[in-house]
Image: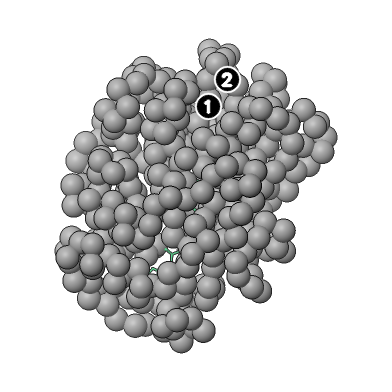
Amino acid sequence: MSILVTGGAGYIGSHTCVELLNAGHEIVIVDNFSNSKPESLKRITELTKKEYKFYEVDLLDASELEKVFSENEIDAVIHFAGLKAVGESVEIPLHYYYNNITGTLVLCEVMKKYNVKRLVFSSSATVYGMPEQVPISEHFPLSATNPYGRSKLVIEEILGDLYISDPEWSIVLLRYFNPIGAHSSGRIGEDPNGIPNNLMPYITQVAIGKLTELYVFGNDYPTIDGTGVRDYIHVVDLANGHIAAIQKVLESTGFNTYNLGTGRGYSVLELVSAFQNVSGQKIPFKIVERRSGDIAICYADATKAKDELGWVAKRGIEEMCGDSWKWQKQNPLGYESQKESLVGRNH
Ligand code: NAD
Ligand code: UD1
């Protein structure tokens, strides 16, 4: 009896695999390494001292994915695998739609064939588009402003249709706010390709000297100091949200959506200041134009996850900054220096 984790070598997936293994679950990981490195899998083993099976499989390859289901007794699936860079999704929308949406369709077809009907899906706060007020609740209107966001929205709707067609399914949509931080060991963390798009990896790369200064996108928003406000959530808290969600899908049928956030917003400058205090590193910054498509304020109403999943985010902004910094300091090149293939190997 195992939980299949798609995209388990990635940032959130690897942290979730550690928490799943530590909680005593058996897991099978599938990833095509399109945005991750085999080294992250080795470190999952190192941190947990537990074994699991790994398949280097692309979700778009139905017959290879079928093998995973035929060779293992899968109970439920946590589906992280997807492409996530907003800017890139604007440049190559078809690739994003194909990978994210078709990948999910293939997965659901294979699940159906093997009578596996329990699924936790990685959605995003991006499906709220430009929210009219905060905190953001699950029942707020949904919209998309870019192909990445639209792929999430379409998948949410497809999964809703799937549940309507067959109420034996048990599906949880998790809408993440802004995951940052890393495992407290500093052994796994976020390893973006090229220049980071997101704030925290950009800050840590300035701190380590890889980038010279942070560009703050606008200081004329209606916020505490004019800079954008977000609900940053520690990736280990987020990972634990999946443990709660998997319990929910294993115990009951239904279709449920939960925000995973802390319920507290921090501005860009507040995050920079917290990071400087924790790390002792100065982060030089320059205020520049707003980034197109950005919203002023975004934070979650996470009471539904608390009431129904018994989950709350426990780690504060200092811990988030401290763990991001530890990961970056210990791995200045990310996983880069340890590239090697683990194809077909058990761990
Ligand atoms: P990530 O890129 O680190 O992890 C995704 C993993 O999926 C990667 O290891 C990648 O190689 C794999 N993958 C992609 N396409 C695949 C395919 N066709 N077949 C097999 N493997 C494939 O991203 P992450 O930050 O860990 O995000 C995980 C999920 O959470 C994604 O679906 C993302 O859209 C969603 N999400 C992330 C954030 C965030 O800020 N990180 C926020 C909201 C939602
Ligand atoms: C981004 C994605 C969003 C995704 C979310 C979580 C975009 C446009 N949106 O949102 O779809 O769901 O990540 O992964 O990419 N900032 C700077 N300088 C930087 C980087 C960011 O000032 O170099 C600011 C932004 O303007 C924002 C805040 O920092 O106010 C957070 O930015 P970011 O980490 O990119 O997350 P989101 O904008 O919330």
Residue 307, x across and y down, in percent: 63, 47
Left/right placement of residue 136 relative to residue 180 reads right
Q: In which quadrant of the rendered view does residue 236 lie?
A: top left
Q: Residue at x 50, y 31 (%)?
A: 5
Q: Is mark 1 on a helix, strand or loop?
A: strand
Q: Which amino acid does label 1 sit on?
A: Leu
Depth check, front residue: 263 or 326? 263
Which secondary structure lies at badge 2?
Answer: strand
Closer-to-camera residue (146/98): 146
| Placement of the N terminus among the 4 image quadrants | top right
Q: Is residue 161 left or right of residue 325?
A: right
- Distance from disc 1 to disc 2, alpha carbons, whole Å, reads 6 Å
Mark 1 Cα shell of 10 Å, populated few (<14), some (14-19), many (≥20): many
State which image quarter holds ligand 2: bottom left
Compared to residue 321, the image places residue 58 above or below, namely above
From this viewpoint, which residue is outermost toward the bottom? 220
Tell me, yes or no, whether the two marked residues, 1 and 2, touch with CB atoms within 8 Å.
yes
Q: Name the quadrant containing residue 285.
A: bottom left
Q: Which mark, by number, is residue 4? A: 1
Residue labelled with disc 2: 74
